[in-house]
Every structure is written in C-alpha cells, then in structure tokens.
C-alpha cells in the first residue's frame, strides 16, 4: 500500500522539502517576534493585568541553571521545520505552530496577564542569559504559556524521526520534560500558565493530525 500526500496533485516533491521549511521557519519566527512584542506592549499599558499565581507556585524553587534548557527551545524550534521528509507533514506542523501562536496572542490581548514575583538576578553567564531574556520577555504574556504550547508541538514533531532509536527517543523525552520544568523553575510562568499552554498545544495536535491518504 503506497502512502501519498493528502494534497491532491501534490507529489512528494522531495524527501526533505528544505526550501519550504526555510520559508515556514522564517514566517513563524517573524509572527512570533511581532505578535509577542505587540501583545507585551499592550499588556504593559493595561492597568488591570491579571495573575494566575497560586500558593502552589510559591513552593517552586528558583533554579537559575534551568535557564539553559529553557532557552534551548529557541534553538530546537527552528531546527524542527527540517525534521520532515514529506511536504504534507511540514505543512501540518507549520499550521499547528501558527495556530498555537495566534491562539496565545489572542489570549494575551483579551486577558493581559502579569508575573507578580520579583525575579532574582543570578551572577555570571547565567545571569547574562536572564538579562538578555528579560530585555525581550517583559513580565507579561503569562497565560497561556506559548513556551509550553510550542514545546509540545516540537516534541511531537521529532517522535517519528526517533521511533527506531530507543536511546535517542528517551533522551528526547527527558530533555523536553526538563524544558517544561524549567518554565516554572526559572519563574517565567506559573502552573496554570503551563496547563493552559499544554491545552493549546494538545488542541492543535487534535485539529491537525499527522495523517496520510492511502490509495
């Protein structure tokens, strides 16, 4: 049984549609930069930004070193667009990413959210990373966590490539779990932010499943 692309008349153009992957990577990155920046400024101008911080969040320690796995998603994210061997899979991943971004941006605009915790300032290179992060990510746009939503989509996208590599697959699971944990141990998000972000990511996985049409 031969599996073909679900786009009619669209042959599997190449095993690695890297040209279109570059386009989607640049488009989604630009959408993130513009959308996140605009909604951040919008939230900063609102006098009634809300917080989903709870007593459970107060129990989570600040672990400065987890900024490294947290920021690793910024490197993994663009690479993921080149993980697909079929054009329809690339397009579905791009649709998921764009949908998750637009959903989170809408939530940021409709219900501006703020981080109520004063963030520590570590020393050394780790502290420099936090300074660079805060220069772009102001203490707004908390709920839902776009970081968590994107992480779920990126985690799912690499699984087919790792299905025959057991050790690499478990290493990938472990690293993604560490990235997810880092969203709260760096105090960039609260627990409800993460839950909502994962819900956004899961919804896009359901709406755009990776399936092929069989003939």
Image (cartoon, grey):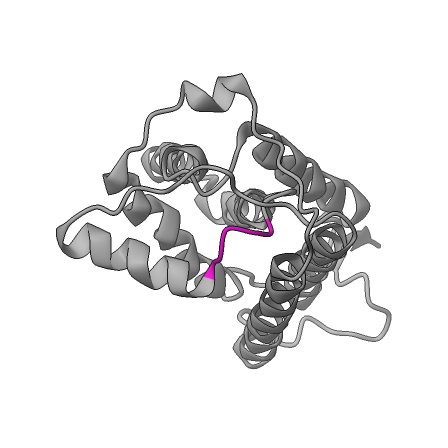
Q: For this view, does 110 lie left or right of residue 47? A: right
Please check the rendered image and state whether residue 188 is part of the magenta-colored stretch, yes or no: no
Q: Looking at the rendering, which quadrant does residue 43 occupy?
A: bottom right
Viewer-closest of 154 and 107: 107
Q: Residue at the location (36% across, 53% down)? A: 71
**Total number of numbered labels?**
0
Give the percent coordinates (x, y) of residue 87. Answer: 66, 68
Please check the rendered image and state whether residue 138 is part of the magenta-colored stretch, yes or no: yes
Give the percent coordinates (x, y) of residue 211. Answer: 75, 49
Q: Is residue 86 visible in the rendered structure shown here?
A: no
Give the percent coordinates (x, y) of residue 1. Answer: 75, 49
Q: Is residue 189 above or below residue 78?
A: above
Q: Is residue 162 above or below residue 26?
A: above
Q: Which residues are magenta?
A: 137-141
Q: Residue at the location (62% across, 32% down)? A: 52
Q: Is residue 121 visible in the rendered structure shown here?
A: yes
Q: For this view, does 169 lie left or right of residue 215? A: left
Q: Residue at the location (33% across, 63% down)? A: 132
Q: For this view, does 141 lie left or right of residue 77? A: right
Q: Is residue 70 above or below residue 74?
A: above
Q: Residue furthest front?
A: 47
Q: Is residue 192 above or below residue 59?
A: below
Viewer-closest of 78 and 165: 78
Determine the main secondary structure of the stretch shown in magenta. loop
Q: Residue furthest left?
A: 124
Identify the image quadrant of the C terminus: bottom right
Viewer-closest of 18 and 79: 79
Give the percent coordinates (x, y) of residue 104. Answer: 69, 52
Q: Looking at the rendering, which quadrant does residue 64 occupy?
A: top left
């Amino acid at each position: 049984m031969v599996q073909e692309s679900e786009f009619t008349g669209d042959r599997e153009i190449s095993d690695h549609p890297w040209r279109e992957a570059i386009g989607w990577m640049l488009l989604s990155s630009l959408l993130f930069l513009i959308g996140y920046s605009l909604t951040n400024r919008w939230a900063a101008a609102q006098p009634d930004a809300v917080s989903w911080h709870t007593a459970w969040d107060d129990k989570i320690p600040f672990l400065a070193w987890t900024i490294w796995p947290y920021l690793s998603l910024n490197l993994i994210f663009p690479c993921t667009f080149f993980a697909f061997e079929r054009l329809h899979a690339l397009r579905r991943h791009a649709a998921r990413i764009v949908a998750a971004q637009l959903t989170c941006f809408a939530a940021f605009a409709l219900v501006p959210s703020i981080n109520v915790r004063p963030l520590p300032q570590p020393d050394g290179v780790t502290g420099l990373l936090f300074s660079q992060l805060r220069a772009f990510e102001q203490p707004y746009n908390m709920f839902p966590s776009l970081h968590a939503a994107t992480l779920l989509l990126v985690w799912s996208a690499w699984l087919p490539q790792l299905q025959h590599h057991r050790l690499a697959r478990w290493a990938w699971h472990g690293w993604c779990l560490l990235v997810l944990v880092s969203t709260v141990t760096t105090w960039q998000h609260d627990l409800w932010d993460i839950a909502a972000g994962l819900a956004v990511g899961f919804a896009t996985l359901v709406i755009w499943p990776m399936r092929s049409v069989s003939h």
